[in-house]
């Protein structure tokens, strides 16, 4: 969906000029350099002409072979934990104009549509869910050179993005986020640093259990390993986080640490076992199709599970119960510094000492 409101917020990623609607209604044109930008797919393609040397693997179709991006089910397990923390920290509401930086499929935008906030999503990868395309303003763009006007958003969020960036790319992204936020604006992030606290020993134990289960054929972690192979983990520790945030114009207003010990067991063992069993069952129902059989079975199993979750019923409420158990990780370990964390970064208000120094 490309609304009139979005067209007032965007700009050319190359020359920073405003865009105007083309007469054929299938593109927008830069008022400065006259470059045309495609709108035919329901989102606005505002990628810069110059390609950055550093590129994410999330552009690869292989990473999306399980088709988890194709549809949006209600948030459960870790997705609900992150979305609940987003609401708790950021408090989106009517009157807010929010940027989802690295929106992926667009699911967080759909989940928070009822907040009354106007949310715009940006991602470098074109794997948007159709439901998000139909309901949300989406931009195909690079977070290191946001095609957005300066100081036009009150809030922003970025989930599971920063760990995929190099130190230089992280700095570039945070500086761009600071630029598009109005003074006093806030940015909610979920990511992790390399240094872990002692609760991470429990996560490592669960991951070892998962690898043993994989060796005996109870689950399959290949897709998860592929996803994590894109992690560059630019932040060494939380002191490094504070220094990088300050260098990019932010102060850390709030932080909660997250050691998902129970969560790791729920998602990396039990959920993966269920997914593997459903994929094998789906595979037996599919006609032989050569080397893509595994992916086809996983896609079929995931689509069926998402459909059941959307309908509610036993599966949905079972997952909600598991999610409630995962909340215990926050109660037990939320104050213990460790790798994963939720943080609220604030751009100093105009006239504050921090803003004056910059």
Image (cartoon, rainbow, N blue to C red):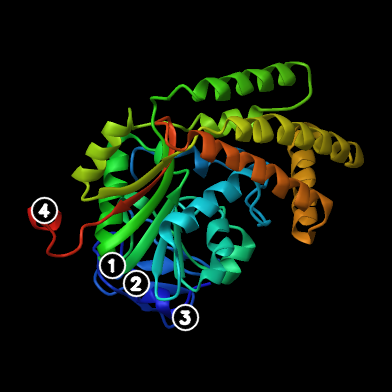
* Residue holding disc 2: 9
Q: Using the numbered discs, state the Cα–Cα distance from disc 4 to disc 3 in whole angstroms.
A: 44 Å
Mark 3 and mark 2 in contact? Answer it, CB < 8 Å.
no
Q: Position of residue 112 (x, y in %)?
A: 54, 64
Q: Residue furthest front?
A: 332
Is 273 placed left or right of 109 in the picture?
Answer: right
Mark 1 and mark 3 in contact? Answer it, CB < 8 Å.
no
* Residue holding disc 3: 24
Q: Is label 4 in a helix, a strand or a loop?
A: loop
Q: Residue at x 79, y 21 (%)?
A: 217
Question: Residue 73, which numbered label?
Answer: none
Q: Viewer-nearest of labels 1 and 3?
A: 1
Mark 4 Cα within 10 Å, few/some/many (few <14, many 20+)? few
Q: Is label 3 in a helix, a strand or a loop?
A: loop
Sequence-earlier tag: 1 or 3: 3
Sequence-earlier tag: 4 or 1: 1
* Residue holding disc 1: 149
Sequence-earlier tag: 4 or 3: 3
* Residue holding disc 4: 358
Please name whichever residue, 108 or 299, is drawn nearer the observer in this view of the structure: 108
Viewer can see residue 306: yes
């Amino acid at each position: 969906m490309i609304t009139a409101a979005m067209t007032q917020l965007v700009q050319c990623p190359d020359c920073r000029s405003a865009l105007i609607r083309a007469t054929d209604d299938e593109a927008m044109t830069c008022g400065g350099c006259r470059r045309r930008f495609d709108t035919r797919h329901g989102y606005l393609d505002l990628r810069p002409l110059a390609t950055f040397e550093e590129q994410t693997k999330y552009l690869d179709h292989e990473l999306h072979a399980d088709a988890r991006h194709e549809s949006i089910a209600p948030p459960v397990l870790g997705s609900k934990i992150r979305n609940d923390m987003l609401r708790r920290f950021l408090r989106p509401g009517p009157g807010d104009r929010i940027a989802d930086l690295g929106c992926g499929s667009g699911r967080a935008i759909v989940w928070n549509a009822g907040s009354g906030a106007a949310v715009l999503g940006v991602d470098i990868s074109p794997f948007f869910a159709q439901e998000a395309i139909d309901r949300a303003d989406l931009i195909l763009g690079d977070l290191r050179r946001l095609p957005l006007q300066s100081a036009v958003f009150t809030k922003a969020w970025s989930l599971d993005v920063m760990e995929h960036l190099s130190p230089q790319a992280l700095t570039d992204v945070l500086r761009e986020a600071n630029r598009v936020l109005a003074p006093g604006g806030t940015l909610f992030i979920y990511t992790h640093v390399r240094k872990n606290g002692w609760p991470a020993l429990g996560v490592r134990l669960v991951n070892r259990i998962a690898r043993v289960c994989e060796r005996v054929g109870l689950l399959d972690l290949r897709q998860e390993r592929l996803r994590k192979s894109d992690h560059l983990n630019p932040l060494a520790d939380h002191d490094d986080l504070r220094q990088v945030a300050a260098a990019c114009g932010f102060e850390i207003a709030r932080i909660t640490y997250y050691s998902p010990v129970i969560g790791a067991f729920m998602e990396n063992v039990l959920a993966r076992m269920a997914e593997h069993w459903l994929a094998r069952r789906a595979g037996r129902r599919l006609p032989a199709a050569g080397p893509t059989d595994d992916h086809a079975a996983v896609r079929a199993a995931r689509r069926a599970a998402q459909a059941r979750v959307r309908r509610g019923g036993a599966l949905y409420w079972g997952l909600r119960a598991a999610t409630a158990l995962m909340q215990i990780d926050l109660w037990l370990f939320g104050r213990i510094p460790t790798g994963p964390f939720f943080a609220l970064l604030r751009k100093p208000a105009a006239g504050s000492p921090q803003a004056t120094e910059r």
